[in-house]
Image (cartoon, rainbow, N blue to C red):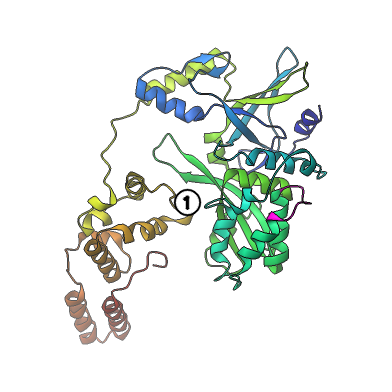
């Protein structure tokens, strides 16, 4: 009953003219069919069959797994005739993978605002401290260069693991971070982590941390979202750190900060779920994805017929790229596919820009190919199109020398100086994909 009241209290609106939407956790756990809607799309495409619907759910030969759900602050609901079931429109599942058994109790503990979760659920700081590529792991990369405090991770590790009085590990982590490192969480976002094709994608989360003196400036909102994300790249006041979706949910509960998502992405990944109140036990669960009409299932099947999967295109592995021109002509999507085919799945987020993909990929190329790529990009100052048209070991110096002579004869000192500067830059043969 308490949970139903809390769900009804979820307020505020999302309108068509808002580019970023605020999300809030639905205060109950539930189940989710692994893979969800988009995997069912792909599966049906491969098998050239229609999606099967049974009792409102996608019929699949996989067991549901535990999941939490995010919803807009004004959620669309529809109570069914029996009064014990309610359809929740446009919610986002956050499945809890079975690789760890401490995530669910940690989130449930954080969900209880009065702090009583530490008495009801068993949790430890390991859900934060022992996560490879988790929020603490990624944030620690900045401790030395950004904060000039290389020993902070050890202090945080010890403090979080010993903080038994906190409401949850997320409360402990953020309190310790503020106390020891003097930084504060100012924003949480969900974004595309990777998108192998036009149909499927994987979601990721990130957290915005600010030095204590600049918290007000870096407080993330729907209005300043794009501005802060852009400014962060060159700022020494705040940093965006990748994290797991469940970590984002836990930090959201610990701080009350909303989770932001682009409206276009929300429209793509949100699904319907069914909230069930079991009268005999009083237990409330949420199940998804849910289809509430036969017509809807037919519409999905029609979409499948119109977008059958095309034969997959052969994807090169990194070690199969034998010359610089092949690399320089690759589109960003092809580079990401190449890295995936080479067994690298933890790719830079699209938010970080294409140069981050190059910074990851170029060092993996054959040594001679990598040198030629960097040499050409150095000569063209990062102009990929121009660099891709060059021949191996071709240099632009003779052309620049002729242009310099012409500019000198005409007395154009400004142009002549610019050409000399370019020739000097070429002589360095230096190109950094992280800072082009």
Q: Residues within 10 Å of mark 1 (few under 14, many from 20)?
A: many
Residue drawn at (45%, 18%) of the image: 51
Q: Is residue 106 visible?
A: yes
Range drawn in magenta: 161-168
Q: Quadrant of residue 79?
A: top right
Q: Is residue 430 left or right of residue 142?
A: left
Please, is residue 283 above or below residue 358 in the view? above
Question: Does the magenta-highlighted stretch encompass residue 306?
Answer: no
Q: Is residue 93 above or below residue 412?
A: above
Q: Is residue 285 left or right of residue 99?
A: right
> Of 284 and 71, which appears nearest the observer?
284
Q: Position of residue 420 (x, y in %)?
A: 28, 82
Return the x and y of residue 357 as percentages of the image width and height. Answer: 39, 55
Residue 247 spot, x, y in % from top left: 62, 47
> Could you tell me which quadrant the C terminus lies in?
bottom left
- Residue at image location 74% in from the left, 18% down from the top: 278
Q: Which of 206/164 is in front?
A: 164
238 or 122, which lies in front?
122
Numbered marks: total = 1
What residue lies at 58% left-to-right and 16% top-to-bottom? Answer: 56
Residue 229 visible in image: no
Residue 227: quarter of image: bottom right
Please give the residue where the numbered disc 1 appears in the rendered image: 349
| On screen, residue 230 above or below 86 | below
Name the image quarter holding the N terminus: top right
Q: Element under label 1?
A: loop
């Amino acid at each position: 009953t308490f949970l139903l009241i809390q769900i009804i209290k979820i307020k505020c609106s999302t309108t068509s003219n808002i580019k970023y939407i605020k999300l809030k956790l639905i205060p109950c756990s539930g189940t989710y069919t692994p893979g969800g809607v988009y995997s069912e799309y792909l599966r049906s495409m491969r098998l050239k069959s229609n999606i099967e619907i049974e009792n409102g759910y996608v019929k699949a030969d996989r067991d549901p797994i535990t999941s939490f759900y995010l919803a807009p602050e004004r959620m669309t609901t529809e109570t069914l005739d029996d009064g014990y079931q309610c359809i929740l429109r446009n919610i986002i599942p956050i499945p809890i993978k079975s690789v760890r058994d401490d995530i669910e109790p940690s989130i449930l503990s954080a969900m209880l605002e009065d702090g009583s979760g530490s008495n009801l659920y068993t949790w430890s700081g390991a859900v934060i401290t022992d996560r490879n590529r988790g929020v603490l792991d990624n944030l620690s990369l900045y401790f030395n260069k950004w904060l000039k405090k290389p020993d902070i991770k050890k202090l945080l590790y010890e403090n979080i693991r010993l903080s038994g009085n906190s409401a949850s590990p997320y409360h402990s982590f953020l309190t310790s971070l503020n106390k020891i490192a003097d930084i504060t969480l100012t924003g949480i976002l969900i974004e595309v982590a990777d998108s192998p094709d036009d149909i499927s994608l994987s979601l990721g989360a990130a957290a915005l941390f600010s030095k204590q003196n600049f918290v007000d400036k870096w407080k993330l909102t729907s209005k300043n979202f794009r501005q802060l994300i852009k400014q962060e790249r060159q700022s020494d006041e705040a940093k965006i750190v990748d994290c797991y979706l469940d970590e984002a949910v836990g930090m959201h509960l610990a701080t009350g900060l909303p989770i932001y998502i682009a409206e276009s992405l929300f429209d793509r990944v949100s699904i319907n779920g069914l909230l069930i109140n079991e009268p005999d036990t009083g237990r409330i669960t949420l199940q998804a994805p849910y289809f509430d009409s036969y017509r809807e299932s037919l519409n999905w099947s029609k979409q499948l017929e119109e977008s059958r999967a095309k034969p997959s295109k052969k994807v090169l592995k990194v070690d199969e790229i034998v010359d610089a021109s092949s690399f320089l002509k690759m589109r960003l999507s092809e580079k990401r596919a190449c890295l995936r085919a080479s067994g690298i799945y933890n790719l830079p987020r699209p938010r970080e820009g294409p140069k981050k993909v190059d910074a990851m990929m170029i060092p993996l190329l054959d040594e001679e190919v990598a040198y030629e790529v960097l040499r050409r990009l150095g000569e063209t100052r990062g102009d990929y199109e121009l660099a891709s048209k060059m021949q191996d070991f071709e240099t632009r110096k003779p052309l620049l020398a002729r242009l310099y002579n012409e500019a000198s004869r005409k007395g154009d000192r400004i142009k002549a100086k610019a050409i000399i500067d370019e020739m000097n830059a070429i002589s360095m043969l230096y190109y950094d994909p992280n800072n082009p």
